């Protein structure tokens, strides 16, 4: 939190009757969708009031969403019923922590809040199946705004975060099997808070930044420079995602905000950042969310100068198509989702958008693919699989299935989703069933829980089956 939580965050409450008036009312450069057809622009739900601001949000293996505000009191939201229930407390302030899931589905939480720029050295597991917390050995120092990255062997890299107003520049790896920490003493590096980090197909961890790097986490750690971004400062509340194995996009950010986006392909011999299409709206404090059809949804953010300026609230979602590199303007939400907002893909294919300072509420976005006909269904699928295994997915819609997609459960805060990943799975069509081949490489699909989606020829996804691998 870079400024007071008492910052005023505006709300859009006026009913706009004429498109011309909407255009006049919006800051220059903002685009609005020119149709209300949900099959083209999607559709937002009404606003749901929540007990607290969802600063941190996580999709659990149970299919429910865990979230917490500026304290140690988490809650759970059920997407199927909209019911909210309190969860067990961790016993310390989870605000400004890092988080990711380990292979067995427990949430691994690092750091936390003493006061601004003073981080806790705590680490804990949350078990979503028993609603219990387990305290773990302390880290090498406090971390406020750290980043967790799950590795191919199931261990977790933890980097950055402030400790007593100074950056904790000593990366460390949580070794799940032994329950111990390993410091990467030859890999000290001052990184931005909540650094954007991604497990790459080569097994190293990619740091998406002005000067991008790989971190080899073996031994005591080694950094290698990869390339330079076209726009400096995107870590200043831009949002990034690995939209295909080894392919990363970094969107928006900086002050004043930019509408540009860059991509890099780590599968190339010499990866280089390149511009892709620009959004209609400049944004910082946005969230980007991977969707089962392979597109990327940008929600929230502000187009105005300043840390978190509600006068520049961007209500229109935008959808990026990696095949064309272009953005399309989608339907608009009603609430300003800026600093301390979160967004998550849900198992039913919708996207939760929640929080933002002084916004203890949520909206749910239904992408256009949910308005393009009947959805395929999954009758049954295994609850756990092994790497490279072929497994059966029973579906009465087998003959219509065109794609099978695999997305890791998300864990997001401060424009940084530390867990979402996407990949395509190969399959063969049988009689009322599919034979699907599981990912073979944990560097592409690290151990843990994923959503399996079936998509038909119209790009309409099923409700996902949540499956554990590894």
Image: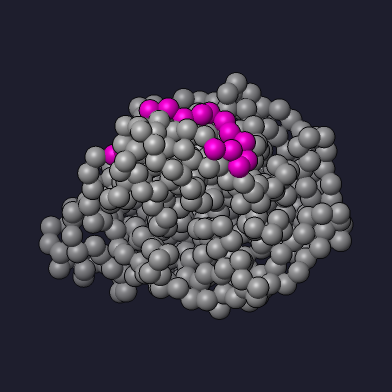
- Establish if 387 lies above or below 242: above
- Establish if 105 lies above or below 288: above
Residue 63 can be seen in this image: no
Q: Which residue is painted at 78% across and 47% down in the image? A: 173
Q: Nearer the viewer, residue 25 or 230?
A: 230
Residue 31 in percent (x, y) is at 28, 68
Magenta-drawn stretch, dominant element (helix, strand or loop)? loop
Q: Nearer the viewer, residue 429 or 459?
A: 429
Residue 187 in percent (x, y) is at 82, 61
- Establish if 168 lies above or below 281: above
Position of 11 compared to 1: left or right? left
Position of 97 compared to 221: left or right? left
Residue 27 lies in quadrant: bottom left
Residue 139 lies in quadrant: top right
Residue 146 in percent (x, y) is at 67, 51
Q: Which range of residues does the magenta coloring cover? A: 375-390
Q: Which residue is painted at 15% across and 64% down in the image? A: 19
Q: Which residue is painted at 66% across and 51% down in the image? A: 443
Image quarter (top left, top right, bottom left or bottom right) of the C terminus:
top right
Residue 282 in percent (x, y) is at 40, 69
Kindly give the residue lying farthest to the front in the view shown. 431
Q: Per the image, is 433 magenta?
A: no
Kindly give the residue lying farthest to the left in the view shown. 18
Position of 458 compared to 163: left or right? left
Q: Which residue is painted at 66% across and 63% down in the image? A: 207
Q: Nearer the viewer, residue 84 or 58?
A: 58
């Amino acid at each position: 939190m870079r400024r007071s939580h008492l910052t005023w965050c505006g709300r859009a409450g006026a009913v706009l009757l004429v498109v011309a008036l909407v255009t006049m009312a919006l800051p220059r450069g903002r685009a609005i969708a020119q149709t209300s057809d949900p099959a083209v622009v999607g559709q937002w739900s009404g606003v749901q009031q929540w007990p607290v601001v969802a600063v941190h949000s996580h999709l659990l293996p149970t299919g429910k969403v865990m979230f917490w505000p500026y304290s140690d009191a988490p809650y759970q939201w059920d997407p199927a019923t909209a019911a909210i229930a309190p969860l067990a407390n961790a016993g310390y302030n989870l605000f400004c922590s890092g988080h990711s899931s380990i292979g067995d589905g427990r949430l691994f939480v690092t750091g936390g809040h003493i006061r601004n720029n003073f981080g806790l050295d705590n680490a804990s597991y949350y078990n979503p199946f028993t609603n219990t917390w387990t305290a773990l050995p302390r880290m090498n120092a406090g971390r406020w705004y750290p980043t967790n990255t799950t590795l191919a062997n199931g261990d977790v890299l933890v980097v950055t975060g402030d400790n007593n107003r100074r950056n904790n520049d000593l990366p460390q790896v949580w070794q799940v099997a032994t329950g111990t920490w390993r410091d990467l003493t030859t890999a000290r590096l001052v990184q931005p808070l909540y650094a954007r980090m991604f497990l790459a197909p080569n097994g190293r961890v990619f740091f998406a930044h002005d000067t991008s790097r790989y971190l080899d986490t073996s031994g005591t750690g080694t950094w290698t420079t990869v390339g330079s971004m076209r726009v400096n400062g995107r870590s200043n509340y831009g949002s990034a995602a690995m939209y295909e194995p080894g392919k990363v996009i970094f969107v928006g950010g900086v002050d004043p905000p930019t509408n540009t986006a860059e991509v890099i392909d780590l599968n190339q011999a010499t990866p280089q950042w390149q511009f892709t299409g620009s959004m209609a709206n400049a944004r910082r404090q946005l969230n980007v969310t991977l969707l089962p059809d392979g597109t990327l949804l940008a929600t929230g953010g502000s187009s105005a100068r300043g840390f978190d300026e509600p006068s520049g609230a961007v209500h229109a979602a935008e959808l990026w198509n990696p095949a064309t590199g272009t953005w399309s303007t989608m339907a608009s939400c009603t609430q300003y989702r800026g600093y301390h907002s979160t967004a998550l893909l849900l198992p039913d294919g919708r996207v939760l958008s929640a929080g933002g300072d002084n916004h203890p509420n949520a909206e749910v976005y239904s992408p256009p693919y949910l308005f393009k006909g009947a959805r395929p269904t999954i009758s049954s699928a295994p609850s756990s699989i092994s790497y490279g295994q072929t497994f059966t997915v029973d579906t009465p819609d087998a003959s219509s299935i065109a794609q099978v997609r695999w997305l890791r459960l998300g864990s997001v805060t401060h424009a940084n989703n530390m867990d979402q990943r996407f990949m395509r799975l190969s399959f063969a069509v049988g009689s009322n069933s599919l034979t699907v081949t599981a990912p073979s490489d944990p560097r592409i699909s690290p151990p843990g829980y994923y959503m399996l989606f079936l998509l038909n020829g119209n790009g309409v996804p099923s409700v996902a089956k949540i499956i554990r691998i590894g």
